[in-house]
Image: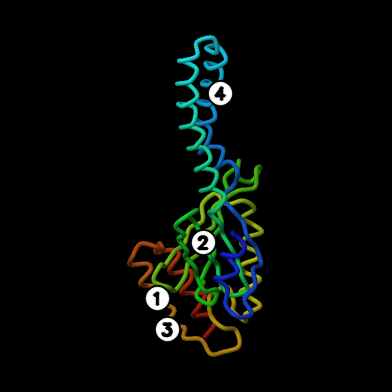
Amino acid sequence: MKNNYIQNMLGENEKVLLVTRQHWFVLFGMILAEVLLILVLLAALITATVFYPIAAIGFIILIVPLVGMVRDILIWYNRQYIVTNRRVIQVSGFINKNVVDSSLEKVNDVKMSQSFFGRIFDFGNVEILTASELGVNIFQRIGDPVHFKTAMLNAKEKLGYGENGFHTQESTDIPGMIARLDELRKQGVLTEEEFKTKKATLLAKM
């Protein structure tokens, strides 16, 4: 069902290049309390097996953390980050689906950050700066962020777009791009230093 759902979202000649999820550390953090509660309840049930009424109540209570753990696993498993040859897609939800996508041609910049433990265990944050209404998409603690960023930039390059978000084979509306960057600066998405750096890069291409 998962694969069919993704396939149904694809346009003509659009192909999935990479599918990833948040790192398993995220799942571990979500279910840790539930696992501990289940273990405590199981230990209590083993001790109370001679008292049938208490054991029966214990089994009923045990259902609660089990259901919660299954729910958290399904939420983690169905939160996917997908790179196609045209878009970057974020899908979440098990029953009710929520889909957010960004066209690669509107991606202006990609930032990746990894902590010390992120580098050891291979997870990190990927921030996508776009020219769409969303402005910035942040994918937090995803697995193998380097591969994700590389797959996205390679797909963008194959479309004929450079890392600054414009088509390399066509004339570029550099003043328009600077104006969009200025709007992002006013909104607080870009710092003054980041704005000046990107503006200088664009002006150098005129």
Please identify, in this view, whether the residue under mark 2 or under mark 1 is nearer the observer.
2
Query: Which residue is under mark 4?
Result: 39
Give the residue type that dot 1 points to: Arg
Please identify, in this view, whether the residue under mark 3 or under mark 1 is nearer the observer.
1
SS of the residue at dot 2? strand
- Spatial CA distance of label 2 from label 4 is 34 Å
Q: Looking at the image, which residue is at 46% across and 86% down?
A: 173
Query: Which residue is under mark 3?
Result: 175
Query: Which residue is under mark 2?
Result: 90
Q: Nearer the viewer, residue 185 or 143?
A: 143
Q: Looking at the image, which residue is at 50% across and 10% down?
A: 51
- Spatial CA distance of label 3 from label 2 is 31 Å
Please identify, in this view, whether the residue under mark 3 or under mark 2 is nearer the observer.
2
Q: Looking at the image, which residue is at 60% across and 41% down?
A: 117
- Spatial CA distance of label 4 from label 3 is 62 Å
Give the residue type that dot 3 points to: Pro
SS of the residue at dot 4? helix
Number of numbered discs: 4
Q: Position of residue 144 (x, y in %)?
A: 64, 53
Q: Position of residue 24 (x, y in %)?
A: 60, 43
Instruction: Answer with mark 2 or mark 1, whichever residue precedes in sequence.
Output: 2
Q: Nearer the viewer, residue 61 or 187?
A: 61
Q: How many other residues sit within 10 Å of disc 3, few (<14), some (14-19) or many (≥20)?
A: few
Q: How many other residues sit within 10 Å of disc 1, few (<14), some (14-19) or many (≥20)?
A: some
Q: Quadrant of residue 43?
A: top right
